[in-house]
Image: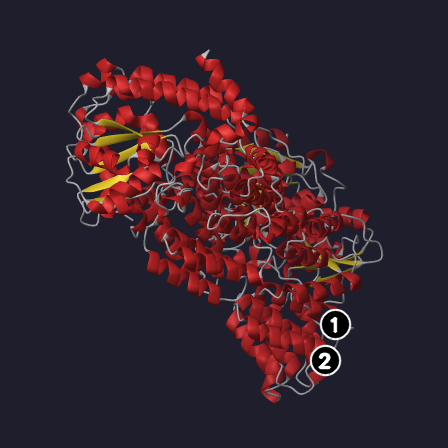
C-alpha cells in the first residue's frame, strides 16, 4: 500500500560540479526526489548509471520516479534490476513487491515481499505490503498475522488499521474489521479509503443507509476514489434503488471508463433491471478491462446463465475459479447454475464441495436446503444454527433464517420454523420502503383505466403477433409449473420472467390513466419493442412464455398491445399462496411478501384486479388455471390448456419434470419433481403462525 | 459519434472560440431541451452562461454537474472559479484544489514525498512552501507565508521561481529561501503557495493582512528615481497587455491604441510593458506621450522600484498590478467584463489590496467606456 524511500539524509550545499562523487550524487538525487524535483533527481541518477550501470540506489530512485509518473512497467524494470544486487536493501524488495501487486503480478509480488521480510524482519512496511498481497491472494489468516504485526509496531498509523480491517472483513470477522476502520478514522478523519471500506463493511452488516452515508462521505473526501462509488451503488442495490445505483456507477465510469469493478457493478444492475443485452455487453467489457479479476468473470458467468447460455456460463465460472482471490464465489455460482440447468446431483455435489472447503459459505448452505429434505436429526440443521449465531453478515443472517425455516418445516418443527421465517422476513423488510396502500390504490386506478369501454375503444389495433404467451398471477401460484408444462411442448419455449412489459408500462407518461390516450401506432410500436426482447429467445419455436407473475397488473395493456396473445392466469388457494411467498427469500425485487399483513392486503388487491380482468377480458384470451385442479388432474388440465392455446396435444407435457431447460425462479427445484400434492391445503397445519395474514383475509370476507 | 453530433460539436467549438456565447447558448439549450444530454454539453452550457456574466446561474449549474458527477475534476475546477468570483471562499478554495487534476495540468503537480500540511500547528518542524503558477499569483499569495508561519509555528522554507527570488527574499517572514530547482535542505511537510488559502481557511475578512508585504530594493529605487527625475509629475506607469500565453489574454489585454484618449490629458506615461506588446509604444497612437523604458527593466526589482517612484500605475490584469498592491502603491486595474476570480464582482475596490482601484468593463469587449471613465478619473488625479 505504500512506497517508501530512504530517510532523507543530510544534504550537501547546492553546488553541483563535474567532480561530484557517486555518494554525493546519490544523496542529492534522493533529496531532489523527496522534494518532488524529479528532473534533477533523474538526471543525477543517469549520471551515476553512466559510470556504474548496475548501481542499485540510482536504479531504485529511477524506479520510484517512473512509478510516480505512472509508468509501472518501467518502474518494475528498474527495481528488478536494482534487486539483482547482492547487497540489496530490504526496502527495495518491499517497494518492488508493492509495484508488482499494483501490476497484478501477485506471485512475483509475494516472492519479493517474502525476500524483504527475510532480509530485514524489522522493516514494518514490508510486512504491510506482504499482508496486502496475501489478502489479495485469499491467504487471509497469514495476511491478518502480517498486518497485526504492522499495527503492533505502528499503532498510530491509520493505514495499518485500515489494511488489517480489510483482511478481517474478508475473513468474516466483521466486528473486528469495524473496530479497526473506526480506529483508522479516529486517527485520520479525512481518510477516504477507510470511509469507503467502512461503507463496504456496513453493506455486509445490513446497515445500508449508514453504508450509503459512509460512501457519500468517502466520495466527498476523495471524489476520484472509485471503490467508494462501487460501494455506494452496492448500498443502493441493497435498498432496491436500482436507478440510484446505476447513477453512481455511471458517475464512476464517467471519469474512469475502464474500471473493472465499476463495469462489473453496472452489469449486475443492468441484469437486475432485466436489460440483458446491455448487461452482457457490459460484463464482457468488464472482463476485457480486468481479465485477471475473478469477479468480472463471475458476473459474466451469472449473466450468461441468466440468458440461457449454460455452457458458456460454466466456462466463465471455471475461469473465475482459476484466478487468485476468492474462488469460492465462482464455485458456488457454478453449482447454482447446475441447479438451474436441472443437474441436481451435480449441483448438490458442487455445494458440498464448497462447504467442505468453506464451511461458512452461507449462500451454498442456503441453496443446498432446496436440494434435499431434512429430518429432525439432520446434523446440517445444527451446523446452520451455529453458523447463524456466529456470522454478523446481515444478508447471510437473512439467508440462514429462511434456510433454517425450510429445514425445520421439513422436519415437522413448525414452531422453530416460523420463528426463523418471522425473523428473516422482519430483517429483509427493514431494508426497503413500501407503501402497501399506495400499491392498492395504483391497482384500482389500473382497473378504472382499463374499463370495458376503454378496451373496446382500442380493440384490435395493437400488434398482430401471437408469439407471446403471458403466464401471470401471484408469485408462488403455480406460474412456474404451468410454464414448465407448456415449455415441454415442441412449439413452446419458456423465457422465464421478463421485466420488459413492466418497463413499457412505466415508460408511458401518466400510466395508468395516460394509457387511454394511446394510438394504434403507439401500441404496435410497443409490441415491436417487446418482441425485440422476446423473439430471440424463441429459438425457432412458435410461442414464447413470459411468466412474470407481476404482469397481472398489466393484463389490460397486454390485451391492447397484443390482441392475439393468450394470457394465462394462475390461481391458487389464497392462504397456500401467501404461505409459500412468506417462506421464500426472493432474489428479484419483491417487496410485498415480507410482512404477513402486507402480504394479505396485497393479495386482496390482486384479487380485485384479476376479478376485473375476468369481467372485461374475453375468456378465450384470458385463460384461468387453478393450481389445485392441475395437481388433481394433470392430464385433463394440460389438455384443456393446450386446446385453449390452439396447440395439438403432446405427451411431453406430462413428463415436464424431465424437460431440460433453465428454471431460475424460486420454484427451480420444485418443477423438477412430479406434481406434489402436499402443497394443497398445506396452510391448515400452520394456521396459528399465520394469524396476521388470516386476519386481513378474513376481514375482507366478513 | 454520429455525423450530426460531430457537426454540432464543430459548430459549438466555433461559436465559443469566436465568443458568440449567446448563439452557443441557444444551440446548447435546444440540444438539452429534454433535460438530458451528454455531460460535455452541460459543462459548455455553464461556460457560455458564465461568459455572459451570469455567474450565479453558472455556479448553480456547475454545482448540479458536480453533484451528479463528483469525480469530474474539470467540472469541479470550473465550479471553484465561479465560487471564488462570487466571493464564496469557504467552498471555493476547497474546489480550487482540483487545479492539478485538469487534463492539461496533471503533469505540473509537484510530487513531494512528504505529507501536505493541513493547517494545524507543527512547531519545530520544517514546512516547505513552494510557489506554482504565474508571477501575479505568486505576488498575490506571498502574503500568506506569514499567516502559515503563525499558524504552523514551523520553520518556513520558502521556494520561489527564480525571477521572484530577490523580491521575495526581502520579505523576512520565513526561515530559509530557495530558488525553484535548487537542492533543498531537509523538510517535514510541504504546501503549495496557492493551497495556503484552503488549509489556513482564509476568509474575505482576513484580507488584506499586513500590507505592504513586499518592499523594493533601495539601491534600485535610487537608480530609478534619478533615471525618471526629469519627467513631469504626476508620473503614471502604464501596462496594456499581459502575458500572451495566458488562457484569457484576449479578454484581459488591450491594444495601446485603445488608450489613445488619455493623450488629451497631456500627461507623460512610462511604459512598464514587457513582452511583444511593448512594440506598440513605438510611434504611440494619438499623440500619447510614452517614455519607453522597457529595455532597462530587467527583473521585478526594477518594476518594483519604478512603481515606488511613479505616482500611479494603470494596468490591465497582469503581474505589475499585484506588485503595486503588494508594495502598497496606488494602482488602477482595468478589468474585462468577466474578470479573473480574484477581482470579485460589482465593486471598484478589492479586499486584497487597499491601494487598488478597479475599472470594469460593463459590456463584453467594450474598453472605450472604461477608458472614458479612466480619463475622468485621471483628470481628477492630475488635479
For mark 1, does the 10 Å Cα neighbourhood hold few (<14), some (14 to 19), or many (20 or more) residues?
some
Residue B180 falls in image quadrant: bottom right
B332 with respect to A373 (left or right): right
Q: Subunit of mark 2? A: A
Q: Which mark is residue A119?
A: 2
Return the x and y of residue A559 as percentages of the image width and height. 23, 26
Check whether the beta carbons of the residues at disc 1 and disc 2 lie within 8 A of each other.
yes
A645 with respect to B268 (left or right): left
Q: Is residue B73 visible?
A: yes
Q: CA distance from mark 1 to mark 2?
A: 9 Å
Return the x and y of residue A173 as percentages of the image width and height. 67, 53
> Do the residues indicated by labels 1 and 2 lie within the same chain of the protein?
yes
Q: What element does badge 2 sit on? A: helix
Residue picked out by circle 1: A123
Q: Which mark is residue A300?
A: none
Q: Is residue A71 above or below residue A21?
A: above
Q: Which part of the image, by quadrant, shows the N terminus of chain A?
A: bottom right
B133 with respect to B225 (left or right): left
Return the x and y of residue A280 as percentages of the image width and height. 35, 52
Amino acid at each position: 500500500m505504500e512506497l517508501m524511500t530512504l530517510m532523507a539524509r543530510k544534504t550537501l550545499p547546492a553546488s553541483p560540479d563535474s567532480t561530484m562523487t557517486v555518494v554525493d550524487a546519490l544523496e542529492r538525487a534522493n533529496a531532489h526526489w523527496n522534494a518532488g524535483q524529479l528532473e534533477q533527481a533523474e538526471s543525477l541518477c543517469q549520471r551515476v548509471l553512466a559510470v556504474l550501470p548496475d548501481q542499485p540506489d540510482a536504479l531504485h530512485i529511477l524506479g520510484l520516479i517512473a512509478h510516480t509518473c505512472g509508468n509501472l512497467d518501467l518502474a518494475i524494470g528498474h527495481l528488478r534490476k536494482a534487486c539483482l544486487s547482492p547487497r540489496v536493501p530490504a526496502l527495495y524488495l518491499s517497494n518492488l513487491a508493492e509495484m508488482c501487486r499494483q501490476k497484478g503480478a501477485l506471485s512475483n509480488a509475494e516472492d519479493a515481499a517474502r525476500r524483504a521480510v527475510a532480509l530485514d524482519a524489522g522493516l514494518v512496511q514490508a510486512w504491510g505490503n506482504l499482508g496486502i498481497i496475501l489478502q489479495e491472494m485469499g491467504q487471509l489468516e497469514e495476511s491478518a498475522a502480517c498486518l497485526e504485526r504492522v499495527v503492533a509496531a505502528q499503532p498510530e498509523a491509520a493505514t495499518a488499521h485500515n489494511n488489517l480491517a480489510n483482511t478481517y472483513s474478508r475473513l468474516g470477522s466483521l466486528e473486528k474489521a469495524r473496530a479497526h476502520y473506526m480506529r483508522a478514522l479516529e486517527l485520520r478523519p479525512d481518510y477516504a479509503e477507510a470511509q469507503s471500506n467502512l461503507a463496504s463493511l456496513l453493506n455486509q452488516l445490513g446497515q445500508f443507509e449508514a453504508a450509503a452515508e459512509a460512501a457519500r462521505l468517502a466520495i466527498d473526501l476523495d471524489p476520484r476514489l472509485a471503490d467508494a462509488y462501487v460501494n455506494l451503488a452496492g448500498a443502493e442495490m441493497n435498498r432496491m434503488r436500482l436507478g440510484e445505483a446505476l447513477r453512481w456507477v455511471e458517475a464512476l465510469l464517467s471519469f474512469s471508463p475502464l474500471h473493472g469493478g465499476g463495469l462489473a457493478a453496472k452489469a449486475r444492475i443492468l441484469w437486475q433491471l432485466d436489460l440483458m443485452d446491455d448487461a452482457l455487453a457490459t460484463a464482457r467489457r468488464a472482463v476485457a478491462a480486468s481479465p485477471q479479476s475473478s469477479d468480472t468473470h463471475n458476473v459474466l458467468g451469472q449473466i450468461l446463465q441468466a440468458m440461457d447460455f449454460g455452457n458458456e456460463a460454466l466456462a466463465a465460472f471455471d475461469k473465475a475459479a482459476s484466478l487468485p482471490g476468492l474462488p469460492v464465489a465462482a464455485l458456488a455460482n457454478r453449482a447454482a447454475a447446475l441447479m438451474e440447468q436441472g443437474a441436481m446431483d451435480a449441483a448438490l455435489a458442487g455445494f458440498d464441495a464448497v462447504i467442505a472447503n468453506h464451511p461458512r459459505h452461507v449462500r451454498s448452505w442456503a441453496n443446498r436446503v432446496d436440494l434435499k429434505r431434512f429430518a429432525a436429526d439432520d446434523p446440517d440443521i445444527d451446523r446452520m444454527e451455529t453458523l447463524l449465531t456466529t456470522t454478523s453478515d446481515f444478508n447471510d443472517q437473512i439467508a440462514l433464517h429462511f434456510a433454517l425455516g425450510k429445514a425445520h418445516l421439513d422436519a415437522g418443527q413448525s414452531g422453530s420454523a416460523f420463528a426463523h421465517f418471522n425473523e428473516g422476513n422482519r430483517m429483509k423488510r427493514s431494508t426497503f420502503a413500501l407503501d402497501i396502500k399506495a400499491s392498492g390504490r395504483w391497482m384500482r386506478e389500473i382497473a378504472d383505466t382499463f374499463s370495458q369501454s376503454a378496451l373496446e375503444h382500442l380493440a384490435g389495433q395493437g400488434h398482430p403477433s401471437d408469439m407471446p404467451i403471458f403466464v401471470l398471477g401471484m408469485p408462488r401460484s403455480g406460474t412456474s409449473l404451468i410454464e414448465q408444462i407448456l415449455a415441454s411442448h415442441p412449439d413452446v419455449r419458456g423465457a422465464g420472467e421478463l421485466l420488459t412489459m413492466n418497463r413499457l408500462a412505466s415508460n408511458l407518461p401518466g400510466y395508468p390513466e395516460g394509457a387511454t390516450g394511446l394510438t394504434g401506432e403507439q401500441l404496435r410500436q410497443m409490441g415491436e419493442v417487446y418482441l425485440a426482447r422476446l423473439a430471440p429467445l424463441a429459438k425457432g419455436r412458435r410461442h414464447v412464455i413470459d411468466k412474470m407473475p407481476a404482469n397481472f397488473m398489466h393484463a389490460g395493456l397486454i390485451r391492447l398491445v397484443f390482441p392475439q396473445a393468450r394470457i394465462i392466469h394462475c390461481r391458487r388457494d389464497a392462504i397456500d399462496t401467501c404461505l409459500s411467498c412468506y417462506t421464500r427469500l426472493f432474489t428479484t425485487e419483491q417487496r410485498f411478501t415480507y410482512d404477513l399483513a402486507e402480504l394479505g392486503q396485497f393479495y386482496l388487491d390482486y384479487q380485485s384486479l384479476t376479478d376485473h380482468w375476468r369481467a372485461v377480458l374475453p375468456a378465450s384470451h384470458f385463460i384461468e388455471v387453478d393450481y389445485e385442479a392441475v395437481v388433481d388432474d394433470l392430464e385433463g388440465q394440460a389438455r384443456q390448456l393446450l386446446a385453449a392455446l390452439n396447440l395439438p396435444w403432446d405427451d411431453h407435457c406430462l413428463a415436464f419434470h424431465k424437460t431440460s431447460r433453465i428454471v431460475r425462479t424460486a420454484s427451480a427445484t420444485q418443477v423438477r419433481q412430479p406434481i406434489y400434492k402436499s402443497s394443497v391445503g398445506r396452510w391448515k397445519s400452520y394456521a396459528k403462525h399465520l394469524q396476521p395474514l388470516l386476519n386481513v383475509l378474513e376481514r375482507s370476507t366478513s | 459519434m454520429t455525423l450530426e453530433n460531430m457537426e454540432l460539436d464543430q459548430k459549438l467549438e466555433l461559436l465559443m472560440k469566436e465568443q458568440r456565447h449567446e448563439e452557443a447558448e441557444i444551440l446548447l439549450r435546444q440540444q438539452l431541451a429534454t433535460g438530458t444530454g451528454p455531460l460535455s454539453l452541460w459543462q459548455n452550457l455553464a461556460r457560455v452562461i458564465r461568459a455572459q456574466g451570469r455567474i450565479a446561474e453558472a455556479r448553480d449549474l456547475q454545482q448540479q454537474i458536480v453533484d451528479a458527477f463528483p469525480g469530474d475534476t474539470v467540472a469541479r475546477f470550473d465550479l471553484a472559479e465561479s465560487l471564488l468570483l462570487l466571493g464564496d471562499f469557504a467552498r471555493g478554495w476547497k474546489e480550487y484544489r482540483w487545479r492539478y487534476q485538469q487534463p492539461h495540468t496533471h503533469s505540473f503537480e509537484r510530487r513531494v514525498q512528504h505529507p501536505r500540511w493541513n493547517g494545524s500547528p507543527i512547531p519545530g518542524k520544517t514546512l516547505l512552501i513552494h510557489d506554482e503558477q504565474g508571477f501575479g499569483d505568486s505576488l498575490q499569495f506571498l502574503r500568506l507565508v506569514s499567516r502559515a508561519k503563525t499558524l504552523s509555528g514551523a520553520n518556513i522554507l520558502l521556494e520561489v521561481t527564480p525571477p521572484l527570488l530577490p523580491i521575495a527574499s526581502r520579505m523576512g517572514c520565513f526561515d530559509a529561501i530557495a530558488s525553484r530547482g535548487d537542492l533543498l535542505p531537509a523538510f517535514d511537510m510541504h504546501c503549495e503557495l496557492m493551497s495556503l488559502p484552503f488549509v489556513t481557511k482564509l476568509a474575505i475578512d482576513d484580507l488584506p493582512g499586513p500590507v505592504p508585504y513586499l518592499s523594493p530594493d533601495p539601491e534600485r529605487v535610487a537608480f530609478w528615481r534619478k533615471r525618471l527625475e526629469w519627467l513631469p509629475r504626476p508620473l503614471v506607469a502604464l501596462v496594456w497587455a499581459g502575458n500572451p500565453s495566458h488562457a484569457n489574454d484576449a479578454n484581459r489585454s488591450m491594444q495601446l491604441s485603445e488608450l489613445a484618449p488619455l493623450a488629451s490629458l497631456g500627461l507623460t506615461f512610462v511604459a512598464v510593458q514587457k513582452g511583444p506588446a511593448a512594440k506598440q509604444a513605438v510611434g504611440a497612437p494619438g499623440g500619447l506621450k510614452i517614455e519607453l523604458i522597457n529595455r532597462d527593466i530587467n527583473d521585478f526589482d526594477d518594476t518594483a522600484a519604478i512603481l515606488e517612484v511613479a505616482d500611479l500605475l494603470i494596468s490591465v490584469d497582469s503581474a505589475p498590478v499585484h506588485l503595486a498592491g503588494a508594495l502598497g502603491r496606488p494602482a488602477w486595474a482595468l478589468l474585462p467584463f468577466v474578470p479573473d476570480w480574484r477581482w470579485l464582482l460589482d465593486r471598484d475596490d478589492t479586499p486584497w489590496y487597499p491601494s487598488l482601484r478597479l475599472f470594469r468593463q460593463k459590456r463584453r469587449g467594450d474598453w472605450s467606456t472604461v477608458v472614458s471613465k479612466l480619463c475622468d478619473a485621471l483628470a481628477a488625479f492630475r488635479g
